[in-house]
Amino acid sequence: MAAEFPAKFSAEFSGRLLAWWDRHGRKDLPWQQQRSAYRVWVSEIMLQQTQVTTVIPYFERFCRRFPGIQDLADASLDEVLSLWAGLGYYARARNLHRAARICRDQYNDELPDTLEALQSLPGIGRSTAAAILSQAHNQAHAILDGNVKRWLTRHRGIHGWPGKTAVLRELWQAAEALLPGRRPPDYTQAQMDLGATVCLRRKPKCGACPVSDDCYALQNDCIEQLPERRNAKPIPQRETAITIARDKHGRILLQRRPPTGIWGGLWSLPEIGPDDCAEQLGLRGKSEHVLAPFQHTFSHFRLLLQPYLLECAETATAVRSGTDLQWFAPSEWRQLGLPQPIKKLLNDLENS
């Protein structure tokens, strides 16, 4: 369907949506209180591919520790990742930290207030930049997060997988055509709330929808078919060994992972079996134990981890591989940014 609407229709559409939000919208989310560009930015990054109920406690802890850009920029990456651990998609945290340092050094501890400048920062795309400017600076910009894509696809009858360039272009055109010239922060939040609370992925609440009267999917009985899904591919299964090397003082050997890729920048256990520890790491063990394997699911593959416990024969002070390997006491590794399944494994070992 064409994304060009008469101005009268766009005004009437936004009027219905805003009237619904006034009565039923979410107005007590923590980033809506003491609203600032910084708090909106942090919330928007955390909410990417993560539900509101999961984000709230992380957001509150994060903003208590880093109440402003300078606090975040001056912190170490380890501390940032430690507070992020469990949210997943750790590139978001690394980009947040990098962007804060750019804002500290180039923008006087402030986020820039234009779309172009915001999108130049790491981790901020078009929709995130628009959401920040709309909610923090009262600027009228179209957004297109996952919730908005879902209801907009259904309402306007936009076919095709939303990840395709042509389909995404049509969605942006529709979002911009429906954009009102008033109440930008409320309209932005109303769009998010419509997808999050009414136009759900499964079993949408069409009877409660303020714009259902002219919804293409409802009129054509194709709600379950929109948005169209990408052709599913089998999820690959991978396997790896990890070794918990522990010295006589209870210290654990951890390795800093590369800055990109899975668990990028976090500390984790070396991906190595105990038989190779002497040759590759210079470690000797007095005993080794095979622990129960466990599986962790990422967005695009499943990883089966086989952990081993290597009790070292003597106190280790260094290992051969260099500075990416380091010994940590329990009081120290608990403060690091560790992948959640690795932290659980170490906690379970400590408590066994």
Image (tube, rainbow, N blue to C red):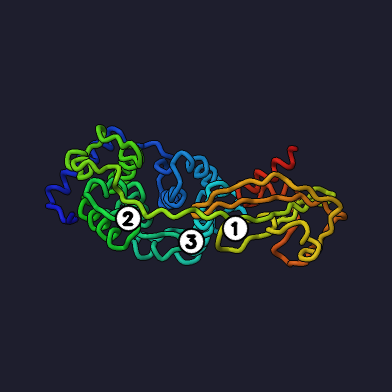
Marks 2, 1: nearer the viewer? 2
Examine the rendered structure and indicate whether residue 117 appears above or below residue 217. below
Q: What kind of residue is marked 2?
A: Pro
Query: In this figure, which residue is indicated by the disc labeled 1?
Result: 77
- Residue 263 spot, x, y in % from top left: 58, 56
- Give the quadrant of residue 282: bottom right
Query: Measuring 46% from the left and 63% from the top, which residue is drawn there?
Result: 122
Q: Is residue 181 visible?
A: no
Query: In this figure, which residue is indicated by the disc labeled 3?
Result: 99
Is 261 displayed left or right of 292 in the figure? left
Q: What kind of residue is marked 3?
A: Ala
Q: Secondary structure at mark 3?
A: helix
Earlier in the chain: of badge 1 and badge 3, it is 1
Query: Measuring 37% from the left and 54% from the top, which residue is drawn there?
Result: 230
Is 111 displayed left or right of 295 in the figure? left
Q: Secondary structure at mark 2?
A: loop
Residue 162 is marked as 2
52 or 152: nearer the viewer: 152
